[in-house]
Structure formats: C-alpha cells, structure tokens
Image (tube, rainbow, N blue to C red):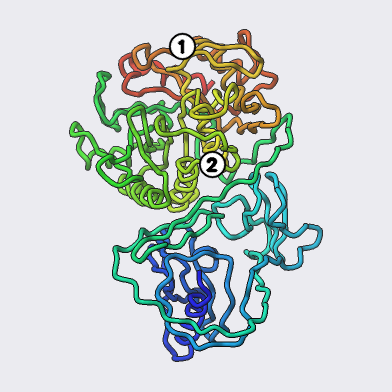
Amino acid sequence: MTRNTIRIASLLGALLLAAGVQAATWQEGTTYSANTVVDYNGKTYSALVTHTAYVGAGWNPAATPTLWKEVGNSASPAPSTGPTASPSANPTTSPTAAPTSSPVPSNTPVTTPPPSTGVAAWDASKVYNGGARVSVGTAIYEAKWWTQGNVPGSDQWGPWKLISGSVATPTVTPTATPSATPTPVVSPTPTPTATPCPIVTPYPGSTWVPPTTPGSCGYWVPPTPTPVTPTPTPTATPSTTPGTDLLPKHVVVGYWHNFDNGSGVMRLKDVPAEYNIINVSFVEGDQSAAKGTAAFVLDKLFNEAEFIADIKLKQSQGVKVLVSLGGANGVIVIDSLEARERFIKTLGDIIAKYGFDGLDLDMENNLTITAQDDYRKPVTPQIVNVIAGVKAIKARFGDKFILTMAPEVNYVQGGHGFYGGTWGGYLPIIHGLRDDLNMLHVQHYNTGSIGGTDGRQYSQGTLDFQVAMTDMLLTGFNLGGDVNKPFPALRADQVGFGLPATTSAAGGGYLSIAETQKALDCLMKLQNCGTYKPLKAQPDLRGIMTWSINWDSKQAYQFAKSHSAYFKK
C-alpha cells in the first residue's frame, strides 16, 4: 500500500464525518471493494482489500485488521495516520497532493503493549508450541499449534485463541526520519479500464505483490515457514473435547450412493436406523467450471424434492446426514486464493440447499505434500486452502456443524514409514482441523501391508491390521520414523476405522463381523487381541465406518445391525 493511499483512506473517513455524511453500516454477506468506508460499532473503517464478508465467518471490521483499517469514529473525525503493516489490494489512482515537509515514515517496527501480569508479551521472532500463552495488552492468547510470526488476534482461523481479556493486536508505530527536501507527488496517468480483479481473502502471513502493468492484478504470496527442529514429545496430550458432543457415544457410519455401481440404489428414507451417520456420496469438483467450484448433481434416479424430504426425515430420527467431498473419481483443485473463495461459496451453498448436517472429507486425488511441508505449518497450496476453506465453511454454519474424514491408509499411517507426496498427505489437514474434527475413520481397505509403530508389517483384512493402524492414531507416531517429527495423538472419541461391507465392495480389506468385533474388543477392552496388543484400553473409541450402505443391503444390512448391537451391549 502507498502512503498516499493510506492517507486518502483516512482523509475520506474524516471528510465524511466532518461533512455530516453517514457512511454505510457494515453488514455480513456483502462484498466490499478496496477503500470502501463503513460504520461499525461507532467507528469508521476503510476496506484494505476487496473481499466478501461471508455470513457467520465473523469477518467484521473490528476483528479483521488484515481486511479493514480504522479511520475514525461516528462522533468525530479521526486524525490521519501513518502506514500500517496490513497489505492492500490494487491501489486506485492517487490524486495530486501538495508538497509537505512533514517527516516521512521510513519503516514500521512492531511494538506490543505492556504484557498482562505473569504472561510474557508476544514476540514476532519467537517460536511458540501448542499450549503456549502470550499477552497483547490486557488480552491473553493461547497457541493452538506450532507458530512463529502469526499475530495474535489478527485472524480467527489462525493459530491463536483468545483466553481472556478483549481482542487486541500489537500496534504498529512508525519511526519517522526527516526528509531533507520535500518531493511533490505527481499524479500518474489514469489506468485504462480493465477486467475487475478476483475477490480474494488474504491468508494470514501472506505478502501482497502489487500489479506490475496497467490493468493487471496483484496477488498474495503464501508465507515461507522458518525451519525449526521440534522438541520430541514421547507422549502427546490430545486437546479437550470442544463444546457439546454432537454424536452418540458410539456410531456406525455408512456411505450412501448417489449413483448405481452394481450394488443397487435406495432412497435415504429406507436406510436402516442402525446407521447413526449417513455420508451422501459425492460432491466433486466441476471440471467444466473454474478451479475450486464444487458440484453436487443428484442422479436422475432420484427426485430432488423427495431427497430433501428424506434428509429431514432421517434428521428427525436423530441421524446425522453429511455430504462427502471427493471419492475415487472426485477431483477438486483449490490451488489459489481465488479457487478457495469459489470452494467456500459453492460447497457452502450446496450444504445450505440440501440441509446437510456437515461435511465428510474423502479426498483421494490431487492431494500431495511437498518435501518442505511441516504438518503444523504446511506450504502446499492445496493443503493450505483445504484447511482454511473448511474452517470458513464451518464458521458459516456454526458449532453444530459436523466434520468427518475418510482418507486412505497411505495418506495417514503411511506417513510413519515415509513422509512426502501422498504418504502422510492428510496429516497436515487432520492436524490443522483437529479442533473441528468429530471423527476420523481411515479406509482400512484397498491397500497393501503397512508398518506399525512396533516395527512389524501388517496386512489388510486381518485383526492385527485394524488394531495396529487404529492404535497408531490413539498414541501418536513419528513421521518417517524420525523421533524429532512426532505426530500427536487424537482423542479416542475422534477415532474409528473403515471396512468394506462385503467382499465385492472393495479391492481387498474385507474382515468378517466376528473378527472385526475382536478388533473392537482389543482396542476398547484389551480383550481378544492377536499379535498386536495396545498398551491402554480405549473405551471411548467412536465407532466404525463402512463402504457402503448399498453394499450392506445385499446381505440384509448385517454390518450395520451386528455392529450397532455390539456397541449397545
């Protein structure tokens, strides 16, 4: 942002107030262009970047200093201010300004208000691990995960959560250096009219790169993480359960086909009550539209009005109906901020239209990580944007929004043997959304043998495979076998595992009902174990998942009925 642009935004707010002109009141759901002036809670703000204030996202001017700059208040004009640390979108043509001999700010060091008693002030250069606390003025923040350089209070999706006090962010105090000779500001030649630039929301820590030629668009460069050597943690401590539990103590999850793959079709209303969660399959990327566009096309076998009515019926019976994103053939590319905005909008609108209770992430394509990815602070654009996009969608629908995941084994436990590419590719997403995650049920099928934390190899379709792979999530494991790269455990109530309902449902991995329940006995009670025996019983293990409800119908729903009865014992 140029100094003239900042001064213009400040003067605009002041002139409006001085002239008695009432600026428009900020409202959710509105798209604001850069330099738009609004009133919010008695103060006047100017937009730093073009963006959309999604309903439920909480992106009001007071809470988002990366999007808004305060320029005054409703009662009196605010003084003109120096430059801030927040980047702006494409600056508009600056008018001619009179020369001035006033000192010109040359840099903008960050200074933090005095810390609250007993809690050290936030330091931009310091590395903080999850659970660390800092102060900003009278506010106390706690780190959700590893972070460095992320300003507390600047982004509600960021690594800091407010523990006490009012929301506060470090202030920016310019250091002035006198100018020997004032330089007149020359008005540039007006820029030709061009196609409007995309509406984007900056990712925390990104750097704004302004347009280089007339009519071109600027863009945001994601932050580059500072390499650090994490401190090994032998035993990770899972976070506490966030809010009221939205699910029964134990669940049976099933996928419902929005297509016929030879297993037959059925209406949602005919799904047996033993399924606590129904994942409607699938939302996919619209390959005929711009990147990030999500699409859900109800098969011609179904009537849309009946489908929506069936969702409401199942919900009235206590069943949670989610929509699943991905599947074996579903590809959605979210490799830029523009694509992320489309993803948030289009997927959110699908969820709202049909009244789904939440989202299941079953992304099996276009999901790899680079060698530079730290699962705590990923840099791969697709990974970064999936995390931020899902958080924004959840914010739109509130605390009752349910999030589940069904990655393949190599995307999760595969990261124990090797971390890179698809191996461990889901781990940054799981970690970035762990406070929002209700259940992770990894697909224990369509895979080969995978190494456990005991150094042994375990093959799909066996009792030991279910126990060893699930226990890895309950105790944590080292990425690539490196003790300096520990992935922390999940809570037992966040974990389950997935199996095919029949031998025809998947390419391997089927396990009989009896052997499956032995695996559950071993995990939950330390009984009926095979070669692999966990160190601790996990009675709060959330449950089990199957692909699919349609395949289960071929055997009179034996999977759902048997396991539902097991959990009720």
Q: Determine contact: label 1, label 2, CB under 8 Å.
A: no
Q: Quadrant of the C terminus?
A: top right
Residue situated in front as seen by the camera: 11 or 503: 11
Q: Amino acid at mark 2?
A: Leu
298 shown above or below 499: below
Who's the residue at 58% across and 66% down the image?
Answer: 85
Q: Kindly state the secondary structure of the residue where label 1 is placed.
A: loop
Residue 313 visible? The answer is no
Q: Which mark is residue 511?
A: 1
The residue located at (74%, 36%) in the rendering is 231
Q: Is residue 517 left or right of residue 138?
A: left
Q: Residue furthest bottom?
A: 19
Question: Against 459, is 550 above or below?
Answer: below
Front one among 305 and 551: 551
Farthest-out residue, left: 300
Expressed as whole percent of the image width and height from the top left, the position of residue 115 reads: 76, 63
**Residue at screen point 52% across, 79% down:** 7
The circle drawn on residue 433 is 2
Q: Foreground mark, 1 or 2?
A: 2
Q: Report the side of 66 relative to 233 (left or right).
A: left
Task: Name the residue at the front extreme.
Answer: 181
Amino acid type of the residue tagged 1 in the rendering:
Leu
> Which dot marks residue 28?
none
